[in-house]
Image (cartoon, coloured by chain):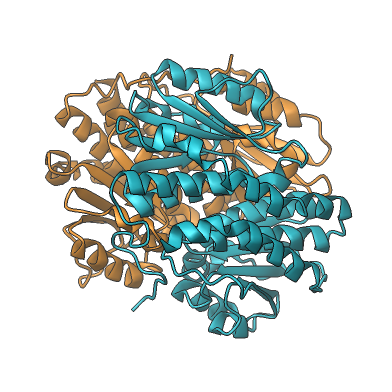
Chain colours: A orange, B cyan
Amino acid sequence: MYTYNEIMAQGQKLERTKDIVQLMTFNEDAVDVVLFTGCGTSYYLAIAAARYYQTVTGAFAIAVPASELFLHTDTFILTHKKYLIIGISRSGTTSEIIMSLEHLNGAKNIRTMAVTCNSDTPMARLTNELIALNDISEKSVVMTQSFSNMLYALQLYAAKISGRTDILEQLEKIPALVQSALGNGQQLTQVTEDASKKRFIFLGSGAYNGLAKEATLKLKEMTQTECESYSNLEFRHGPISIVDKETVVIIFTQNETEEYDQALVKDIQKLGGFVVIIGIASEELEADLIFKLSAEVDDLNRLVEAVPYFQLLAYQHAIFKGRNPDKPRNLTQVVKLS
Amino acid sequence: MYTYNEIMAQGQKLERTKDIVQLMTFNEDAVDVVLFTGCGTSYYLAIAAARYYQTVTGAFAIAVPASELFLHTDTFILTHKKYLIIGISRSGTTSEIIMSLEHLNGAKNIRTMAVTCNSDTPMARLTNELIALNDISEKSVVMTQSFSNMLYALQLYAAKISGRTDILEQLEKIPALVQSALGNGQQLTQVTEDASKKRFIFLGSGAYNGLAKEATLKLKEMTQTECESYSNLEFRHGPISIVDKETVVIIFTQNETEEYDQALVKDIQKLGGFVVIIGIASEELEADLIFKLSAEVDDLNRLVEAVPYFQLLAYQHAIFKGRNPDKPRNLTQVVKLS
């Protein structure tokens, strides 16, 4: 089982990623916009990284799917502004990211960086800077440790660029926190091994919205279960109509959202939904199942600590449904456009 | 049937909206970022409006859910940059939009505008400028003509602000084009009245991604059918694993995406999916069902012409499934946080 082993080895890999990024130096020239881009899992990573980057550095950051960057360039790139484009790709060979970088290459208002698990690729050769995590070499089609490690690398990058040693200190705790999160997965069987649970919704806001999207994708890729993601309070504005007794809602909570999340939990439970919380949780917070994340680090810095839970949820549910997580339906490891 | 009547009356309402906005004058002081915000349908409208605004005016525009704007203010608002916040709300009373505007009120780097169907509300009183479409007064819980009209108003606003009379001329054709689109709905019964079609995916990129999200919400609100939305080429990066013979994929095409959309259509059909195209379509483009939009206007300007198709799709499917579109499950017209 490649996938399981790759999920469970994340703790050690994150230690190595920490060492790699901490030793690097980066171009610190200011730009108007930092634009994070990728496809699928890497795009969801881009969403989380963009929100994290803007909050930590105080510079504009946005996330755009790589395909849109070359198809609708005028919609995203303004020629009178300076951009840093950060391309994210496990393989460094995904068609759309290469096409975007080639398309934008040489523009005077653009410099580029690659974040990848393979330094010997077209992507690395096309970019001005490179964060290469060559220790990550997943055999699985689905991205697991590559997601957490590339996200963690971009958090370390933001902290370094902004000179925030207080944040770096918090981030240093992450590999150990992830290691212990990986040990808590057994409690997830309450939802992953219950055949009456047929629909999964993941809710996260800010940087956690990227996690919610990635959680949905993991479950869909490995099990083809009906699942969706929203920003926490957005859920009431229409999508809540889907909730019934077959529905599980997993909420990523943060200090800033906790008060509102509690009311949301009750609204969902009233309609018959089963609610799981992953995140910060006070003694008062009530739900059907709670995975409490560390209070030692701030909401944004503990982002990666939440990752093992949704990866294990998808893996366990695949096993329960009799699917092979190593061979997801209709998918290949790298998407190449013909 | 309020909902049906409100959908079918869009053509006339858009004529009136055109007249209202064309007579208005707006504050043209430059800002660093135009931030569009709303909840649910209004948030999806914000996504489409932001992409449209940036492309037409050449000024940065982003879309943020209203709840995130007050819960994670630091993640979205930089104190050293000037913002125009454009709040969108049919009722002008939605809790999160009022909370956001109250929260940001008085900040020196922020001015505000309301886009609403009700000028006599807390929202209108909280903002510096106002686009009020008081002729729109939906009885239905789900937003239909309010969506198309507020989006159209924001397109006219962007064209006016940028002094683009060429774009205004294109936009003037929209009410008539929508009127004729409303007459084509009967062809949708191929998918809406086929019990073997159980899962719907909507794909759109750039401004059309906002439409794809809204299309998903309409169907979910009225019928609780399994449905999702993605950026067109993102769909191959994982979500395509869900496609089978019960799946309908509706693609919003544009000139810029057509070449890639054709390959995508084939990939989906190979897996058994039924593909509907709404948008620009050359003679060569093949799909299972094609709704060709007008070649008289550009991709971005014809945005609202695509709206009747997904609204009628949701309505027809609700009738086919024996649901009452006027009374969607678990929903109220305005969400008020307790």
Q: Nearer the viewer, residue B294 or A7?
A: B294
| Nearer to us in this view, A83 or B285 | B285
Tell me the quadrant of the picture where the N terminus of chain A can be found.
top left
Q: Residue at x 53, y 70 (%)?
A: B90
Horizontal arrangement in the rendering, residue B180 relative to residue A20 (left or right)? right
Q: Is residue B7 visible?
A: yes
Question: Which image quadrant is residue A56 in?
Answer: bottom right
Q: Quadrant of residue B87?
A: bottom right
* Residue B18, x across and y down, in percent: 74, 63
Location of residue A216 by image quarter: top left
Rendered location of residue A227, percent (x, y)? 32, 42
Q: Residue at x 67, y 22 (%)?
A: A125
Looking at the image, residue B263 sits to the left or right of residue A135; the answer is right
Relative image position of residue B136 (x, y in whole percent): 58, 70
Q: How many marks?
A: 0
Instruction: Please determine whether, in this image, residue A155 is positioned above or below residue A107.
Output: below
Q: Nearer the viewer, residue B255 or A284?
A: B255
Q: In the rendered view of the protein, which quadrant contains the C terminus of chain A? A: top right
Q: Is residue A27 visible?
A: no
Looking at the image, residue B63 sits to the left or right of residue B229; the answer is: right
Report the residue at 64% width, 66% height from top. Answer: B78
Is B298 on the left-hand or right-hand side of A244? right
